[in-house]
Amino acid sequence: MSELKKISPSDIELIRDCMFWTSEAWSKPFIELLQNNKLISEAETFIEIGAGSQSSLSPFFLSLGKKTTCSYFFSDMSEYYSEDYLEKIKIRNNYILEKHKIRGEIEYRKMDIFELQGEYDIIFLKSILGGLFRYGQGNISDANSLIASLTSNNLTTEGQLITIDNGRSFFEGGLERLGQRKNKWRYFNKSDLKGYSQLYFFGFVTAFSIKTRNLFLGIIFEKIMYFIDLILERILDNNTPTVILKVFKKE
């Protein structure tokens, strides 16, 4: 593991703006990864697979001078991916680029993750596996098979696949009974995805986001949850984190 790298306050602000959803909690494992992984700064090509209309890390990687590709998934046959988000993603990312004075252009593609072509130094999946392998539509074995395929076929020799997903929290059973998980999204345990080289995780009470439903109150609520989790991180052996980041390399 490389020496701890200092991440600037401006980079932290940029990363949190890119994350959007419960931004402090989701950014923390990613920032820890940046502090401990020098290969990210040395990488030249980056692709984000499955960017969302309100959350994309492509502006951050463009700020590092990477050749940046931002892709999104669209299918007329899908119940959950039938809306074409391209223009919304561009508007959101352009706002981030302008706010943080980032130069360069992001290449946008409509892409099926199961048919990815080419090799990249960094493949980034944020909150994608839970949507692709929802309960009743896939399983953990399927998710591991996809990761094995991407690392084998689509990474350069020193490349890295970075996944960041929702963890199955301590409160998951109660949230399901309250009807908060109707979209069948999969929430992962720390042990579900195999063969990783690095693991970072965070969160105990930060189990959902309300920012899109009420921006002002949502921001306040999420900050409170984040500070509670910072305290709990010091006193709990957290086996049910709400955010899990893993790094996979070509074998």
Image (spheres, grey):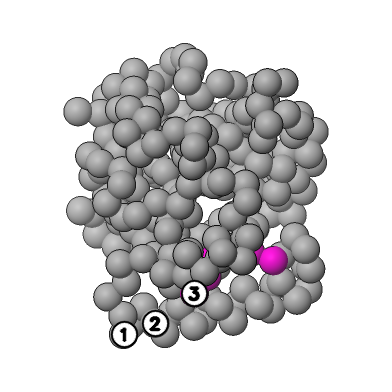
> In the picture shown, does residue 2 fall above or below 217?
above
Dot 2 corresponds to which residue? 232
Answer left or right for 156 relative to 21: left
Q: Are the residues at dot 3 and dot 2 in contact (C-beta closer than 8 Å)?
A: yes
- Which dot, 3 or 2, sits closer to the camera? 3
Q: How many marks?
A: 3
Disc 3 target residue: 205
- In magenta, the rendered stretch is 205-210
Name the foreground residue: 237 vs 104.
237
Residue 18 lies in magenta, yes or no? no
| Residue toward you, 207 or 28 | 207
Q: Secondary structure at mark 3?
A: loop
Residue 13 visible in image: no
Q: Position of residue 201 (x, y in %)?
A: 37, 61
Residue type at mark 1 is Ile
| In magenta segment, residue 207 | yes
How far is the residue under mark 3 from the one under mark 2? 9 Å
Label 2 CA crowd tier, 10 Å (few <14, some 14–19, many 20+): some
**Residue displayed at 38% across by 21% down:** 154
**Measured from the top left, where is residue 173 in percent x and y?**
47, 64
Q: Name the amino acid type tagged 2.
A: Leu
Task: Please give the label number shown on residue 235.
Answer: 1
Tell me, yes or no, whether the two marked residues, 1 and 2, touch with CB atoms within 8 Å.
Answer: yes
Q: Amino acid at mark 3?
A: Val
Residue 213 can be seen in this image: yes
